[in-house]
Image (tube, rainbow, N blue to C red):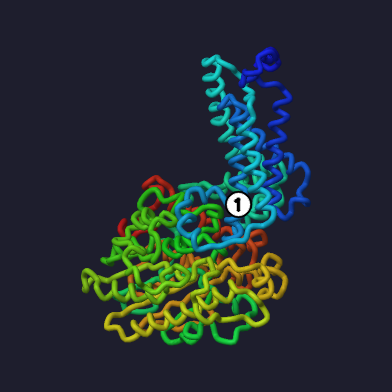
Amino acid sequence: MSDTELQAGPDIKKPTEKRRQLRWYHLFLMLIADTWCFFIIEYVNNPDLLQMKWYYMLLNIGGIFIMNLIAFFWFNSLKRSVLLIHIIWSAMTIVFFIVYAERGEPFQLIDLFSIRTAATVAGTYTFRPTRALIIDIIAGIGLTIIYTLIPIDYVLVKKNKVKKILMRIGVTAFMIAAYPFYLNVNWNGALGIMTDLFAPIRTYHEYGTTVGFFCVAKYMRLTPPDGYSAIETEEIARKAQLEKKSNATTTVKPVNIIAIMNESWADYNYAGKLNTPDEIMPFYDSMKENTIKGHTLVCITGGGTAKTEYEFLTGNSVKRFPGMVPYVSYFTQKEYSLVSTLEAQGFQTAAMHPYKGSNWNRKAAYSLMGFDRFYTQDDFDKNVLKYHGHISDQANYEKIVDVIAHKKNKDQPFFLFDVTMQNHGGYTANDLGTDLTTKGIMSTEANHFLTLEKLSDKALRYLIEYFKNYDEPTIIVMFGDHYPTLPNYFTSVVSGGKGVDKLPLDQKEKWYATPFFIWANYDIPEQQDVVTSTNYLGTMMLENTGWEMADYNYYLKNLQKDIPALNHLGYLGTDGHYHSWEKGDKDVLHKEWEYECLQYTNLKEHGKERLPWFFSLNSK
């Protein structure tokens, strides 16, 4: 671009001319507009704005400015580029506010891939706009009008079509060249940015929402563990295959295997101290006969349901996929899971979720895992019992009973995996009758959640009592996906006034430990107060069925002896204490690395490199 092109202005005697060429001071005006975008998104969403270092503020503004320049060179219009960036950042300010207010987790790139899920549950939430948000909305509308009505549109190229085409080609080439730099160069580390993938909100607050968003987003792809080798990973699998395989705990092979992931099923009396006049889960607490129960570590809180079910069904841990939901991001081919293991032994299989089947890409994911049938809310009667707009656990379990009773082939064993919906977030609807209250904590949302949980316990009693004397051997496993998002003052009081993030690791892990049980209407070893993690739970269930397990399940069973439980925060050692990964034992870290290599191989898109003989019974 020549100085003549930049400085040559229109004849001032032509006031009707609406398009004028760009001058240097116009870029300064663009920078002012971008500074406003930075300020408003931080003002609304970042309580730590005043503590942010000045150079990270400039980094955020600079990033927005670069995107504005890209838009300007593409549209050849200062007016259009500034208007576009302004609208995008104003909208994202609102989106970031709503998502964090309702979910307790910030908006991330992955949410764009699961937007249907977000839309379907949005109607169950209510939120109170803050003064900052109202200011943003008013200012955003006002500036949109001003930008739209500005009569002069400064451009870089006036009428030369060839130059416009070349300019757009240049923009495209720049973006193509910048993409691998963005993904593969450690620019964020060089700038002193420590990206917290399991608590992205910390990254957003410390380094700015715009910078934080792109720092977290760059890690949202399937990458191999450091030092990964396909040959060495196969050697790990071969060695595991040769290790002695433990016998099952029972010779009974149940005809029915029922697995239930109970939405937001949590145990606040385990995590902290909760004072309620009535027991919350009296039936669950009473379960002892033919029951294994305790708590299972998960990697999420407040949301991300599909991550926990992925762990249970596949035996993989989402510890190595901190920002992603495997169903959405990595499922591109047939996947090995409990489904393929049981189908190889003649099982009918079905999944059930009393809500929309499109959530978390479940329709496609369940098909790739091999489920024969997927029951959604469309398979339930329209008049079934609901709480705060969601199908109740009672209605859900009645549907399970009906499906089992009307199996297509009575002589064929049946596996059913169910994800409940009753206790899903949005604890503001007043349709629950008498609430279960907490002493010393005034929280309507918490009272509503605890009331839902008590109703869930009553439904559990119905389910267990129905199958207790059922004429077919039946095993049921149930576990929670995560703790719900409840007001900070509630969790602060329950955790002893410190807040969950400030707790020592041994106590903090309890806030990621949901209840679980394995129960059978035949004899199985009884255990109480077991601590495990959801990646092991499917294997624990299988070894109490007498059915064959894949080599990967035997590997997980042996791994559990060395690492009894694990999640993103750390692991439970054989010494009974929790350890962070940063300070972990060398041998444990090596075993965990081997585990990550196997998981990566499992998800790869190349046939033989996926080691089908190790993960699937069908390939033996």
Q: Does the image show residue 563?
A: no
> Could you say which quadrant of the image residue 347 lies in?
bottom left
- Image location (x, y in percent) of residue 337: 38, 60
Is 170 on the left-hand or right-hand side of 415? Answer: right
Residue in the picture at 62% in, 38% down: 144
- Image location (x, y in percent) of residue 316: 47, 60
Is 430 on the left-hand or right-hand side of 359? Answer: right
- Image location (x, y in percent) of residue 274: 63, 80
Residue flagged by tag 1: what amino acid is it? Answer: Phe
Is 329 on the left-hand or right-hand side of 322? Answer: left
- Say what secondary structure mark 1 lies in: helix
Q: Which residue in the structure is indicated by mark 1?
A: 96
> Could you say which quadrant of the image residue 613 lies in?
bottom left
Task: Examine the rendered structure and indicate whether residue 273 appears above or below residue 9.
Answer: below
Task: Examine the rendered structure and indicate whether residue 496 appears above or below residue 552.
Answer: below
Front-most of residues 2 and 619: 2
Residue in the picture at 35% in, 85% down: 468
Q: Does the image show residue 146?
A: yes
Residue in the picture at 60% in, 50% down: 94
Quarter the C terminus occupies: bottom left
Quarter the N terminus occupies: top right
Q: How many marks?
A: 1
Is 163 on the left-hand or right-hand side of 241? Answer: right
Front-most of residues 5 and 558: 5
Task: Examine the rendered structure and indicate whether residue 507 appears above or below residue 285.
Answer: above
Label 1 neighbour load within 10 Å: few <14, some 14-19, many 20+: some
